[in-house]
Amino acid sequence: MSIPCLTVIEDMDGREIAVLYRHHDGYPEEHGRELAEFLSGIRIVSELPEKDPPDGLVRVVFKPRDKFMYNGERIAEGMTCLAAQIVAFFKQEAGGFHLFPAGDRVEDESYTYHVSGQPDGEAMIRIIENSSQEVSKELFNGTATELLAWLDSPKESDTSSCHEE
């Protein structure tokens, strides 16, 4: 069964920048974990610091998430930069992920992930579970690092489980 989700990226004033639709694996244990693993450790800045001059040619092998390194650390120049990084990280092939304008929604998303942040901080993620009865339930609200800890913690009951097999 397909578990679609939306990732809504908001600027520092709470306005939507973009909406990323994922058709499969949208439950927190999959999309939530991938999103949190990517976002954890990224520092959001209001402007990029001056780049260190190169000391010489250095061969570096990057992991996909490391391509966003700047002066040896993972940073984003505001939320619009972070939004572009999120899209670049997830969109690796045709299909699967689609980019919608701010404010657009689909009718079948099971989960909505709201990504926000402030300068010199880590990205915040809020997870909303959407049901067919038009009732939404907040499952999580915290930093990307806190989401990873939450996903790894034992759940109190089946009602707090985020996805069905």
Image (spheres, grey):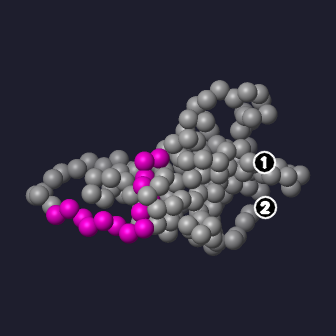
- Residue 107 is labelled as 2
Q: What's the CA distance linking mark 1 and mark 2?
A: 16 Å
Which percent across, then down, holds residue 80? 50, 69
Using the image as rendered, state which of residue 80 and residue 108 is in the foreground.
Answer: 80
- Quadrant containing the N terminus is top right
In the image, is residue 32 above or below residue 164? Answer: below
Q: Give the residue displayed 15% in from the left and 53% down from the top.
A: 58
Q: Can residue 88 be seen from the camera position used here?
A: no
* Residue 155 in view: yes
Instruction: Please tell me whether mark 2 sits on a helix, a strand or a loop.
Output: loop
Q: Hey, what amino acid is under mark 1?
A: Lys
Residue at 24% across, 65% down: 51
Residue 134: % across, % down: 86, 55
Query: In the rendered view of the protein, which quadrant contains the C terminus?
Result: top right
Question: Does the magenta run of residues contain 27?
Answer: no
How many numbered marks appear?
A: 2
Front-lying residue, 94 or 105: 105
- As rendered, which of 62 and 138 lies closer to the eye? 138
Mark 1 or 2, nearer chain start: 2
Q: Magenta span covers which residues?
A: 40-53
Q: Which residue is mark 1?
A: 137
Residue 135 in the figure: left or right of residue 163: right
Who's the residue at 59% across and 69% down the image? 13
Q: Amino acid at mark 2?
A: Glu
